[in-house]
Amino acid sequence: MFKRFKRVLRYSDSAEYPRRYAVMNAFDGVITILGIILGSKLLGSAEAGQIVAAGVGALIAMGISGASGTYITEMAEQERKIKELQDAMLTNLEGTILVRAHREAAVISALVDSAAAILAGLLAITPYFLTVAGYLSEMIAFYSSLIISLSLLFILGVFLGKVASQSLLFSGLKALGIGCLTLLFLLLLNLIL
Amino acid sequence: MSEDPSSLSRVVLDILKPHIPTLVDFCKEISKVKGVKKVNGLVVEVDAETDSIKLTVEGKDIDFEELESTVKKLGAAIHSVDEVLIEG
């Protein structure tokens, strides 16, 4: 299956799009969960069950919105590429492996977009599932979730650094900085409110 | 009726193909055609969207119809058949 995906992306010259969508939306998923857990801890007093419900609801919405938006956008781009190719080849390319690959690439991008946000967000909120199940206290769940979220951001930054052949530590810290900005902003709100 | 013993063992084609699939991927797909043992692809000309290549296919009893169909499936077009070798 994986070999087939690689072939589709190679034949449609779209290898970088799923990577881009994966990182962007994993970021979105983690920051969303970070916002929910920080907001409920610092600005409210939600229970673990409510945090899980809000988190899962937000992630499902992100997944559906990401998949549909990306599919529509990517399909339009791939159809444009197909038309350009047909103009260059002076022939109709319907039914060729190329056209199939272009259209499948749009589906792959949409699935990756959706899965990245949901999986990353679920990882970040896992400690709260354990709290609901009675294995962890809310305090430990909060700090664990915070550490997992910030670690995921760092790892995403390191991955981007590898892609761009830049300093892995610097890229990781840059991404971590974004998570810390979220934390700082909510702390400030807490002080004001 | 006696069986036709002749078999297509070498064919050289002038092909216009898009940049993607690459020459390597293109030749790999051609090598999967029935009867094909060796594929040699040579880029003759490159422009903004397409490559013109000289494709030499060798083997035993090459299925030419399958070869044509594979070239078409890969989004390419055969401009001419420049050389044919039939062995008895």
Image (tube, rainbow, N blue to C red):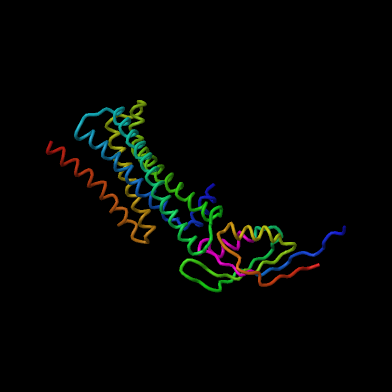
The residue drawn where x is 19% and y is 34% is A43
From this view, report whether residue A134 is shown above or below residue A121. above
Q: Residue A41 appears in which quarter of the rendering?
A: top left
Give the total number of marks visible in the rendering. Answer: 0
The residue drawn where x is 56% and y is 71% is B43
Q: Please tell me which residue lies in front, A152 or A164.
A: A164
**B19 part of magenta stretch:** yes
In the image, B18: left or right of B57?
left
From this view, report whether residue A18 is shown above or below residue B54. above
In the image, A37: left or right of B7?
left
- Residue A97: x percent and y percent? 55, 54
Which residue appears farthest toward the right when viewing the image? B1
- Residue A76: x percent and y percent? 41, 51
The residue drawn where x is 41% and y is 42% is A115
The residue drawn where x is 51% and y is 53% is A101
Q: Quadrant of the C terminus of chain A?
A: top left
Q: Please tell me which residue lies in front, A44 or A65.
A: A65
**Which residues make up the magenta segment?**
B13-30
Q: Residue A44 appears in which quarter of the rendering?
A: top left
Which residue appears farthest toward the left when viewing the image? A192
From this view, report whether residue A45 is shown above or below residue A166. above
**A136 part of magenta stretch:** no
Q: Please tell me which residue lies in front, B84 or A29.
A: B84
In the image, B42: left or right of A148?
right
From this view, report whether residue A166 is shown above or below residue A130. below
Which residue appears farthest toward the top when viewing the image? A134
Q: Please tell me which residue lies in front, B23 or B64.
A: B64
- Residue A62: x percent and y percent? 34, 40
- Residue A18: x percent and y percent? 42, 51
